[in-house]
Amino acid sequence: MPTNFIKKIIDEHNESGRFGGRVHTRFPPEPNGYLHIGHAKSICLNFGLAQEYGGLTNLRFDDTNPIKEEQEYIDAIKEDIRWLGFDWGDREFYASDYFEQLYKWAIQLIKDGKAYVDSLSADEIREYRGTLTEPGKESPYRNRSVEENLALFEQMKNGEFPDGSHVLRAKIDMASGNLNMRDPVMYRILHAEHPRTGSAWCIYPMYDWAHGQSDSIEGITHSICTLEFEAHRPLYDWFVEQLGIFAPQQIEFARLNLTHTLMSKRKLLQLVNEGVVRGWDDPRMPTLSGMRRRGYTPEAIRDFAERIGVAKNDSLVDVALLEHHLRQDLNKRSLRRMAVLDPLKVVITNYPAGQTEYVDAVNNQEDPAAGTRPVPFSGELYIERADFMENPPKKFFRLAPGREVRLMHAYYVTCQEAIKDEAGNVVELRCTYDPATRGGDSPDGRKVKGTLHWVSAAHAADAEVRQYDYLFTEPDLSNLPEGKTWLSVLNPESLKVLTGCKVEPALAQAAPGERFQFLRNGYYVVDPDSTADRPVFNLTVSLRDTWAKMQRKG
RNA sequence: UGGGGAAUCGUCUAAUGGUAGGACAGCGGCCUUUGGAGCCGUAUAUCCAGGUUCGAAUCCUGGUUCCCCAGCCA
C-alpha cells in the first residue's frame, strides 16, 4: 500500500475535521512553457490525491505575468493533462479571473494600514531589503497616509504612471529573518497585453499576492507545491489572515529531477529557441509533448509517478526507472514486427528461384488474442549487419561462416560464404536453408543458439528510423564536473537518423502514433513526419540488450 | 553567517519505540522461436558522536553535510 507524508497530513485533517473531510486540490501551471515530466509528477499527485479521497482537482493557470505567458501554452498544457488521463471537469480557472477581487483586497489592506505605495526604484528596493544576515531598511515612503496610498494606487491602476515608477507593497517587517516578509511587492506596473484580460489592466499582481488568495477563493483545502515555496508559506498565511478569508493548507514536496535531463522551463525554452532541438515536442525533450511523440504511454508515466513516491528530500531519479515502466507497459501491448535497421543481404542459394511464400508470425507472445500475420519469405533477404561476424568471439550466438541459426518464424539457415568488396567489407552472405525446418522448428530436434529477425528483400519497405539517446551525457545536470556547463554536455549522438532501413511491408501503412516492437531492437512509434512514401519511426526505448552489456564489460 | 527545509541500500522510497521492507540498477541461475519477456536466487543502507530504554532509523543532546530564500519571475 503506497503511502506518503501528504496522505498522513490529510488523514490528520480528516480526523480533526479541519476541512470537514473535504479534499480539494489544484494544479496551477504558469502558461509560459510546455509541461514536462516533473509537472506530470505534480499532476498525478494532485489529481491522484483527490481521486483517492473522493475530492476534486481544479486546473488553474497562474497567469500573473503577461510578459511571459501565451495562449499557445495554455492550449498545450490542457492537451497534455488530458493525454495524461486527468479531467478537471468545468473547473478551469485563471488567476486573472480574480484580478478584480485581488484589487479590492489590496484596497482593504491599504485602508487597514497594511499596504503602501512605494516609489523607490527596483534597485533601491533591493538595497533596502538588506541581506541574508542584515535586516532591511524601511522605505521613506512606508508611512504615507492611507489617503495618499489610496490615491496613488488608483492612479497606478488607471495607467497614469510608467512601468517601474511605483509598486504596492505589504507592510510587514523589514527586519524579518524571512526575506519574503520584508514588505513584499504585491503589484507592479506593467503596460503589457495579457492573453486573457487584454489591456484591461496595467498593474499586475505578483505571484505571492495572487496565489494564496486564488487557492482561498477556490476553496482549495490542500495547496500542494514544491519545496522552494516553503519560505513563502508564512507570507501566504499572513495575507489570508489579514483578509480574514478561508485558509488552505500549503504542503511542500520535492520536485522531480531525472538523470540525463533538465526540468528548467527556461533552459528548455533556450533549447527550443536556439534550435538545439526541433521544438517543444522534440522526442528528446522531457516535455509531455516530446515524450508523447517519442512513444511514451500515459500509463507508463502514471506508474512511474506512483513508484517514485513523494517526499521532501531533494532527489535525482534514475531515468532507468522511467524506462522500466515504459518497457513494462509497451511489452504487454505492442505488436511485434520485423525491421532491419542496418541491412546485410542474404541469398539462400538452395531456395527455388523466384519463389515467395508466406510464413505465420506471432503478433505478440504476451497476448495470444493479438493473433498472427503472414510475412513474405523469399530467396533474398536482409538481416541485421550486427547479426553476422566472420570471426565470432566465444559467446556470439548469431551467424558466422559454417554456423546454423533460425530465421524467426521461418527456417534454419546455414552460412556458407561471406562475399566481400574490394575493401574487404562483407557485402552479402550466401546461405542454405533446411526446408524441413519451416516455421522455425527442426523435426530432428536439432537446436540452434541464435534466432534472427529478417525481411524479404523484394517485399520490404524502405523506412527512416530515428534513434534517440539521452539529451545530455552527464547524469546529474545540477552537479556538473569542474568547468562543464549544461550546454557543454549536450549529447552529440542524441539523434541518429537511419535511412534505408528495411521493414515488413505492412509497416509502411502504419499511422502516426502507432506503436510496435521491432523484434530484438526496441519499441518504435510512427512519427507525424511519416508519409506513405517515406515511413518514419522513432525509437521509444530499446529492448534490454544483455549481449551489448556483455560486450561493454569486455 | 539570518530564516526555512532535508539526511535510510548505487538510486528512489517504506518502516514513528519491537525482525530495516519494496522497486529500479547490479550480480548469479532457470527458461526461451526476441541474448526480449518471465521465473528463482543474491549482495548492498539508517550522516556522525553521546544519552534515554529490556529494545532506537524512530525519543533527547551536541555536531556534520546538503538544499531553498536577498526578482517589480513563478
Image: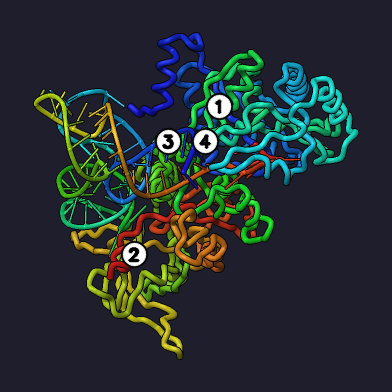
Q: Could you tell me the amino acid type at mark 1? A: Pro
* Quadrant holding the C terminus of chain A: bottom left
Q: How many marks?
A: 4
CA distance for labels 1 and 2: 54 Å
Asked if labels 1 and 2 share a chain, the reply is: yes
Q: Circle 2 marks a residue in which chain?
A: A
Of A136 and B22, the residue lying toward us: A136
Of label 3 and label 1, which has the lower sequence position? 1
Of label 2 and label 4, which has the lower sequence position? 4
Of A540 and A174, the residue lying toward us: A174
Residue A464: give x, y in percent of width and height. 57, 62
Any mark on residue A312, and which? 3
Q: Circle 1 marks a residue in which chain?
A: A
Of label 4 and label 3, which has the lower sequence position? 4
Q: Which residue is mark 2?
A: A548
Q: Which residue is mark 1?
A: A234
Q: Could you tell me the amino acid type at mark 4? A: Thr
**Residue located 44% across and 73% down the image:** A344
Q: Which residue is mark 4?
A: A226
CA distance for labels 3 and 2: 37 Å
Residue A324: give x, y in percent of width and height. 38, 46
CA distance for labels 1 and 4: 15 Å
CA distance for labels 2 and 4: 39 Å
Query: Is B21 located above or below residue A124 in the figure?
Result: above
Give the structural element (helix, strand or loop) at label 3: loop
Give the structural element (helix, strand or loop) at label 2: helix
**Residue located 66% across and 31% down the image:** A183
Residue lying furthest right? A160
Of label 3 and label 2, which has the lower sequence position? 3
**Residue located 59% across and 43% down the image:** A131
